[in-house]
Image (spheres, rainbow, N blue to C red):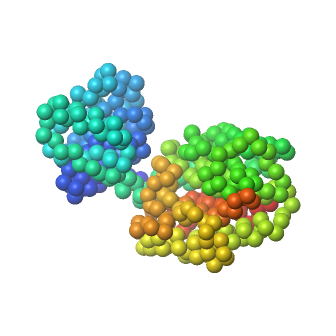
């Protein structure tokens, strides 16, 4: 079922109480949207045990009123932050939490100076991401948005044979994929589209180049769409032209690693245990040193969020979590193969949200 802003605020206030906070400053845009519906991206929420405020400047007054009607609007005028000391004083705040993993040191310094100059006895308390902890478990409405975003990505992959023309460069292909997704309902891309061929595909976060896609070399495409602010993330690696034995060998190992993880990951295990399932397949094939990144990451309002599926992750996987499963093997000078799907945990098992074909990687 979907969650109301009031329900999310109630859960957040429970976390605030556990951390002995009588005020929380929310600055991260994704958290602002999650808690209030405000999509402007600039501003702050100020949450107390009983009150909720949104502070924005002139550009967003009307938008904040429309999108966050349950919040009291604080108008920021000429960039001055007088609204915060006034609220801290009126609400008798003594311990103010802030998102230490998001704001910069400069922003922290300005916040500290504002409090000092106001003569308020307020202790700033680091909180890495309280709202982010709530965002780990997705509601049905959130999952539906991610499914919609995944379907847009799937449609783009289905269109690949018509999008990829002879002599097309990586950069041109990346643009064609982006253009297709936007014309089929995606908002802005959740991250820069990757289209990498040949040796460039051996770079896990390759930059697209004005180099032509070449037959007989791996073509790795990593991209996502965004629907109602929720992201998807998918990678497919294909081989233009005739199949060759090297590509088939590496591809089959990566596919086996991913499928094994899909079959065996279940709720209750740690991110470390999930990562180990796929990693063991690749290590036994002799390519452990060529799989240098984590198996997966949470997907939602951000394309990289909690939980983490990595060799060091202690995150407990739970029903309702959405994350990627993306093993890869990268061979410098030859290329790389990665297969990635956006998945969710439902009834203790993995359910794929991205559904593009990966059994036949030849085009």
Q: How many marks?
A: 0
Could you tell me which quadrant the N terminus lies in? bottom left
Residue 187, picture quadrant: top right
x 19%, y 35%: residue: 115
| Residue that sits furthest to the top in the current view | 78
Left or right: 8 with respect to 2? left
In the rendered image, residue 214, in percent from the top left (x then y), is placed at 82, 51
* Residue at (61, 41) in percent of width and height: 185
Q: Is residue 53 above or below residue 220?
A: above
Please provide percent x and percent y for residue 327.
61, 65
Position of 246 relative to 147 (above/below) = below
Instruction: Give residue 318's position: percent from left, percent from top.
Output: 43, 67
Q: Is residue 228 above or below residue 256?
A: above
**At 33% across and 37% down in the image, what residue appears?**
107
Please name whichever residue, 359 or 113, is drawn nearer the observer in this view of the structure.
113
Residue closest to the eye, 5 or 237: 237
- Can residue 201 be seen in the rendering of this structure? yes
Q: Residue 36: x percent and y percent?
A: 36, 41
On screen, residue 332 versus residue 105, left or right, reads right
Residue 151 shows up from this direction: no
Q: Residue lying farthest bottom?
A: 284
Image quarter in which the C terminus is found: bottom right
- The structure residue drawn at horizontal position 14% and vertical position 36%, both measured from the top left corner, is 120
Position of 322 with respect to 114 (left or right) is: right
Q: Does 174 sit left or right of 227 as displayed?
A: right
């Amino acid at each position: 079922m979907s969650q109301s802003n009031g329900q999310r605020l109630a859960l957040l206030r429970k976390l605030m109480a556990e951390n002995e906070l009588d005020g929380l400053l929310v600055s991260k845009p994704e958290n602002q949207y999650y808690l209030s519906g405000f999509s402007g991206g600039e501003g702050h929420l100020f949450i107390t045990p009983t009150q909720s405020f949104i502070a924005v400047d002139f550009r967003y007054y009307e938008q904040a009123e429309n999108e966050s009607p349950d919040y009291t609007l604080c108008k920021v005028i000429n960039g001055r932050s007088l609204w915060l000391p006034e609220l801290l004083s009126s609400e008798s705040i003594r311990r103010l939490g802030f998102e230490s993993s998001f704001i910069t040191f400069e922003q922290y310094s300005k916040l500290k100076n504002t409090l000092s100059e106001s003569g308020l006895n307020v202790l700033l308390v680091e909180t890495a991401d309280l709202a982010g902890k709530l965002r780990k478990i997705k509601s049905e409405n959130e999952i539906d948005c991610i499914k919609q975003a995944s379907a847009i990505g799937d449609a783009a992959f289905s269109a690949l044979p018509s999008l990829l023309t002879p002599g097309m460069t990586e950069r041109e292909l990346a643009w064609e994929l982006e253009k297709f997704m936007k014309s089929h309902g995606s908002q802005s891309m959740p991250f820069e589209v990757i289209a990498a061929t040949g040796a460039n595909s051996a770079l896990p976060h390759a930059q697209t180049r004005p180099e032509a896609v070449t037959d007989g070399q791996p073509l790795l495409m990593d991209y996502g769409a965004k629907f109602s602010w929720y992201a998807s993330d998918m990678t497919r690696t294909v081989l233009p032209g005739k199949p060759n034995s090297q590509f088939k060998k590496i591809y089959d190992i990566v596919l086996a690693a991913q499928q094994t993880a899909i079959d065996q990951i279940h709720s209750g295990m740690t991110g470390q245990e999930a990562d180990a399932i796929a990693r063991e397949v690749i290590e036994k094939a002799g390519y452990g040193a060529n799989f240098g990144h984590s198996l997966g990451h949470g997907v939602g309002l951000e394309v990289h969020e909690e939980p983490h599926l990595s060799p060091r992750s202690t995150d407990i996987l739970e029903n309702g979590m959405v994350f990627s499963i993306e093993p890869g093997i990268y061979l410098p000078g030859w290329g790389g193969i990665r297969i990635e799907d956006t998945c969710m945990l439902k009834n203790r098992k993995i359910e794929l949200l991205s559904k593009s074909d990966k059994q036949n990687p030849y085009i």
